[in-house]
Amino acid sequence: MSEQFLSTSIEFLKGVGPKRATVLAQELDIRTYRDLLLYYPFRYIDRTKFYKISEIHEDLPYVQIVGEITYLEETGDCFKKRLVAIFKDETGSIELLWFKGVKFIKSKLIIGEKYVAFAKPTSFRNKLNLVHPDLETLVEYKNAINSTLQPVYHATEKLSRNALASKNISKLTRNLLPQVKGKISENISDYLRAEYKLLSREQAIFNIHYPKNTEWLEHAIRRLKFEELFFIQLNLLKLKQVKLSKSIGYQFSAIGDYVNQFYSEKLPFELTEAQKRVIREIRKDLGSGKQLNRLLQGDVGSGKTIVAIMSMLIALDNGFQACIMAPTEILATQHYESVKELLTSLGVEFALLTGSSKTKERKIIHEKLEDGSLQILIGTHALLEDKVKFKNLGLAVIDEQHRFGVAQRAKLWKKNTHPPHVLIMTATPIPRTLAMTLYGDLDVSVIDELPPGRKDIQTLHWYENKRLRLFGFLEQEIAKGRQIYIVYPLIEESEKLDYANLEEGYQHIFNRFPAPKYKVSIVHGKMKPEVKAFEMNRFINGETDIMVSTTVIEVGVNVPNASVMVIESAERFGLSQLHQLRGRVGRGAEQSYCILMTGNKLSADGRLRMKTMTATNDGFQIAEVDLKLRGPGDLQGTQQSGTPINLKLTNLSTDGEMIALARTAAAKVLASDSDLSLPEHRVIIDYIKENQRGKINWSKIS
Ligand code: ADP
Ligand code: MG
């Protein structure tokens, strides 16, 4: 079988042998012919481009010139030989230098012959030269079937030492390609290839290593990108299908008194269209008999809490309990306060459980949970303890999901015979492309609209020279009765430094805003939780004017009267974090401000971050820029997705269209043939069986 040939050990390829085979395996995980074929170049050198010698300067990555050798000399002593050649074209001359193989090279070179020289220009003793250039005669160059785009492969130092630098690797692929002709099986059905205008797999692999020209190269990359994404999407969509078919969920078919009464009498405001849509989506899932597994994304302040509360009421109407878990005690308490305000008059039984709940309270909570009289439990990680047993948990809401690990979430699932419905909420806007690749197996709902009447937060970027003006401005705002956040960065490597930073800043603020006229709170990571909560609550209750803190206030805190967010050393924060911090203000009816204070020296990235912040309040736009600046691995909330992103060709920030295309194609395939048993899908299933062992067992799925 053809694929079997591709499994041949790389050792047997001409030019490899046992020693290099070991190095290839260690350094690049290349063990077989197939591995080498799938080791793509990362860029190409255009060998159609010729430079004139007069155009050459040191900053060029490489040059290719035509000319002749007019002079050749061996210099140095017997220990340190050197070969120098003068190479001329009609515009000037340049030195070619060799330090190794001097005798041999000298014997080959012919004065007066036309050569093509190719190398990176360097300077040596203040003279431009080409060291160890690739040299072939013009005749050889013209005769070579050589592709005009020369592939460049990543190579490590160890590889280079073992004669496996980019150039050597390209020689190996050149040896291999003719042997595998006709042996690379197709893995995308013909009808899909025709529909999406894709090269065959063999054409694509040949052309990614040795492109005939740029056009072929583009087609090759497009085809292989599609393939890369198509199989990811096929897996994700299949996973989702399997989950759905297996996951029996409690069916919440009734909408009863709780929801109806709440909606008609207790709702404190008109829901936004986005909130209504999301609630409809959730309700549909809850009524379907399948387990709800939904990610609810909504920018800070978009009103996710009310959605959570109404979803929980649906559970209650169907005779089930519900819970909401938040990452910090302060957040859990705020949810508790919301529930208290909104649901007390409906006669709903609820309680708060956190690390600081007293033993006696805990006992009562445990009992009432088990006998079912407690309907809603709000809390922190404390909810996950084994002692917390529900009579009948129907819905678990997880707020600010990126603060929880996968294992913690899984624990909630075990709190009932069937897993309860799970609603995951996040304020970290994940760009669509990323969500599709990472969370393709979850359903995603988005609240893409803020409640009406919000004034856009005005964001300003100020340098240190505006500090006096800043303090004057803060004074005015406090005089109007507003409250202010001042946030200092926290850098993990040097907590001490930050603490000093914070202390110093605090002293400064304290001197400028002295007691008793002004009241200042301070919160930082080194405080005991009780002290922290005490200080935080003073601010929440309006007892202090200024909250000086590190980023501990980042998540979810809701103080509508706070209207100014000052971020010190703002250049030290990432974009998402800046946006999260800004989201702490603009929650009331007042005009709010976010002031980014930075030093004068900003990196290009730093400047772009400040510019983005002052230009837009839209979390999704900010996430897009963040993704471009940092790459997906660093984005908050992507680490625990469970889907390893191993993309060779796709760029998540620029290939959105291709991702969507591949997803559409995968969905269409599954819709027509969910177990890929039709003959036209044979190539797809064969490839999956061959290459994706262990990921999903397609054969057991029917
Ligand atoms: P987040 O999505 O960040 O968790 P919250 O649920 O805390 O946002 O809501 C932020 C604020 O907006 C709260 O004070 C809440 O009462 C208010 N709010 C939510 N939805 C609406 C709405 N439809 N109309 C007016 N105010 C709303
Ligand atoms: Mg919230």
Image: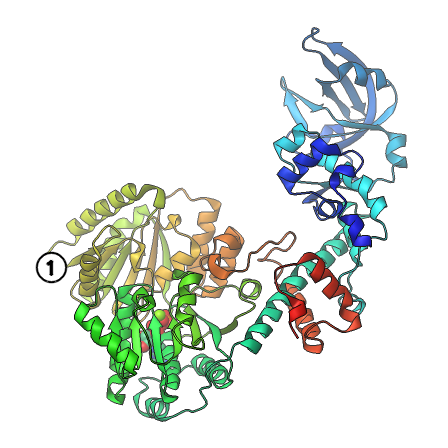
Looking at the image, in which quadrant does ligand 2 appear?
Answer: bottom left
Going by the image, does 362 lie left or right of 16? left
Q: Which residue is mark 1?
A: 517
* Foreground pick, 496 / 544: 496
Task: Indicate if the residue with disc 1 has its beta carbon within 8 Å of ligand 1.
Answer: no
Q: Quadrant of the N terminus?
A: bottom right
Q: Amino acid at mark 1?
A: Lys
Residue 577 pos. (x, y %): 39, 57
Residue at 31% x, 46% y: name it: 465
Q: Position of residue 693 (x, y in %)?
A: 65, 58
Residue 646 visible in the picture: yes
Q: Secondary structure at mark 1?
A: loop
Q: Residues within 10 Å of mark 1 (few under 14, many from 20)?
A: few
**Residue 148 visible somewhere in the drawing:** no
Give the residue at the far left of this rendering: 516
| Quadrant in the picture for the C terminus | bottom right
